[in-house]
Image (tube, helix red, strand yellow):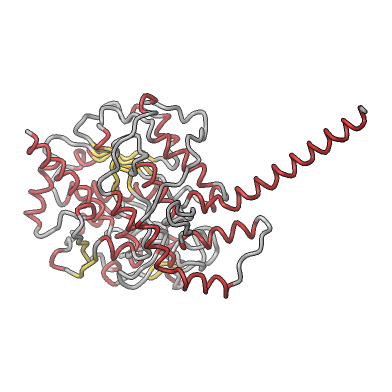
């Protein structure tokens, strides 16, 4: 009798192990589909076409057969734009992997917010529409050729921008005669015809300006040097500081802002450096560990952060989305000194302008860029060998902008307008300076002005 019981116990254990393995395989198959909005829409039952390819790749890795190209083509033509419209119209938030404790040193600084929620960010429906639309730039606004409204850069201003190691696209000497690997890589890519740029980018006189009819995507225009200077200086008149947290693209933007303060707005170099503060951080880890840099922050200051390009399958493997979700949840539990929540912005991540399937930052050969702004640019045209966008930004919007958000943080959605600017790519990842980075600043200034105006009305 004991032998029979032992055999039954062994059978139950084997059955449990087989079931566990099967469930794990199914979860891995659906991983990106769940987290990048390739989930089945809970209302329509339709899977977003943006994630079909990623889901197929994971299924293939797990031993499942990939749908034939003919079937995929038929499905795409049958659903196509209708799928995207349904997702945009009836999107319901996916069940995230939640409060993933990424690492113990991601200590929460404001756990009292754990159960709080805020109303959906007013611009959330528009952001969602842009990031679930293939042609996001066209939906958000337009790049217009207006050389009369483009900034004219002095030699001193250009020299200031050239202090940023990744950005000079107008001076071949800076790539050819250098010991900087980033610049020399640019030189080799240009020789190999691997990067294309527009004429204005190559001669530091980009004539294209961004305009939008949507408040969320508006920028303060540069109509004349004097008027622009007067208008923007008002925004810094009360000693306002901007704390920028992020990777090398944020570092590039830091230099753009500092050079603008000095050469367009007329502040001295020390003022520019002390009021535009950059904290390098790829993963939010350093921000949590080093709180001293925020100790002098005031309620008048702003934070703009971005964590994106260092998350993805190329760096973190197929479960990158779990780690990224953990970071986003940790951000909601972090106290940014005395800076109020509505002065804290998360900047969306721009697409890498490596052409789809033609190499990437970590391959020997690649193709990137273009010869003019492309308002018909689509998410699936870029991203090289791993296309994190628009999935990654949709995760950001779901956590920080939807009704699920726990803090009143804001979104600086620069990604749609940058989708069209492959022509301004420095190396596939970074952007040329001077270039469209300038409009990140002008979009942020517009937010400042809105805040100032609303404060005046309230008083």
Residue at image x 38%, y 31%? 333
Residue at image x 39%, y 42%? 399
Q: Nearer the viewer, residue 16 or 343?
A: 16
Q: In this view, does 365 lie above or below 23?
A: below
| Left or right, 448 with reference to 255 | left
Choose top left, top right, bottom left or bottom right for residue 242. Answer: top left
| Left or right, 96 with reference to 8 | left
In the orientation shown, which residue stands out farthest toward the top?
112
| Left or right, 387 with reference to 136 | right
Q: Could you say where residue 40 lies in the image, as x and y percent from the top left?
A: 49, 54
Q: In this view, does 160 lie above or below 298?
A: below
Task: Give the total number of marks visible in the rendering.
Answer: 0
Q: Nearer the viewer, residue 217 or 287?
A: 217
In the orientation shown, which residue stands out farthest toward the front?
1
Q: Is residue 255 above or below residue 385?
A: above
Residue at image x 21%, y 38%? 270
Q: Could you say where residue 54 lies in the image, as x and y percent from the top left?
A: 53, 59
Q: Could you say where residue 23 lies in the image, as x and y percent from the top left?
A: 65, 46
Q: Could you say where residue 100 lies in the image, as x and y percent from the top left?
A: 50, 35
Q: Nearer the viewer, residue 364 or 285?
A: 285
Q: In what quadrant of the picture does the C terminus appear? A: top left
Choose top left, top right, bottom left or bottom right for residue 138. Answer: bottom left
Q: In what quadrant of the picture does the N terminus appear? A: top right
């Amino acid at each position: 009798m004991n032998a029979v019981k032992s055999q039954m116990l062994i059978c139950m254990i084997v059955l449990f192990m087989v079931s566990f393995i099967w469930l794990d395989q199914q979860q891995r198959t659906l991983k990106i589909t769940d987290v990048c909005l390739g989930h089945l829409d809970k209302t329509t039952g339709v899977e977003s076409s943006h994630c079909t390819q990623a889901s197929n790749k994971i299924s293939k890795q797990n031993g499942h057969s990939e749908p034939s190209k003919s079937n995929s083509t038929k499905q795409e033509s049958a659903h196509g734009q209708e799928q995207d419209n349904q997702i945009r119209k009836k999107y319901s938030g996916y069940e995230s992997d939640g409060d993933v404790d990424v690492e113990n040193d991601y200590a929460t600084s404001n756990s009292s917010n754990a159960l709080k929620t805020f109303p959906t960010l007013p611009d959330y429906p528009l952001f969602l529409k842009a990031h679930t639309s293939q042609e996001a730039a066209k939906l958000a606004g337009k790049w217009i050729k207006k050389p009369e409204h483009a900034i004219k850069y002095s030699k001193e201003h250009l020299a200031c921008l050239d202090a940023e190691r990744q950005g000079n696209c107008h001076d071949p000497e800076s790539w050819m005669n250098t010991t900087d690997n980033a610049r020399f890589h640019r030189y080799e890519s240009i020789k190999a015809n691997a990067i294309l740029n527009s004429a204005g980018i190559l001669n530091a006189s980009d004539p294209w300006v961004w305009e939008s009819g949507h408040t969320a995507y508006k920028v303060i225009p540069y109509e004349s040097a004097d008027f622009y200077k007067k208008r923007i200086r008002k925004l810094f008149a009360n000693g306002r500081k901007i704390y920028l947290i992020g990777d090398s693209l944020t570092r590039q933007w830091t230099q753009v802002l500092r050079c603008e303060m000095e050469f367009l707005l007329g502040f001295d170099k020390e003022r520019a450096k002390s009021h535009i503060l950059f904290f390098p951080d790829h993963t939010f880890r350093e921000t949590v560990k080093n709180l001293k840099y925020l100790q002098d922050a005031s309620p008048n200051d702003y934070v703009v952060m971005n964590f994106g390009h260092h998350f993805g399958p190329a760096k973190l493997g197929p479960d990158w989305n779990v780690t990224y979700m953990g970071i986003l949840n940790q951000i909601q539990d972090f106290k940014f000194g005395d800076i109020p929540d509505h002065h804290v912005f998360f900047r969306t991540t721009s697409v890498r302008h490596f052409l789809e399937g033609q190499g990437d930052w970590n391959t020997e050969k690649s193709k990137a860029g273009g010869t003019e702004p492309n308002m018909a640019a689509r998410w699936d045209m870029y991203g090289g060998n791993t296309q994190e966008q628009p999935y990654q930004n949709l995760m950001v919007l779901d956590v920080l902008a939807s009704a699920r958000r726990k803090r009143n943080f804001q979104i600086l959605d620069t990604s749609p307008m940058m989708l069209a600017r492959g022509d301004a790519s420095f190396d596939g990842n970074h952007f040329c300076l001077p270039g469209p980075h300038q409009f990140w600043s002008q979009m942020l200034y517009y937010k400042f002005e809105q805040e100032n105006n609303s404060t005046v009305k309230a008083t």
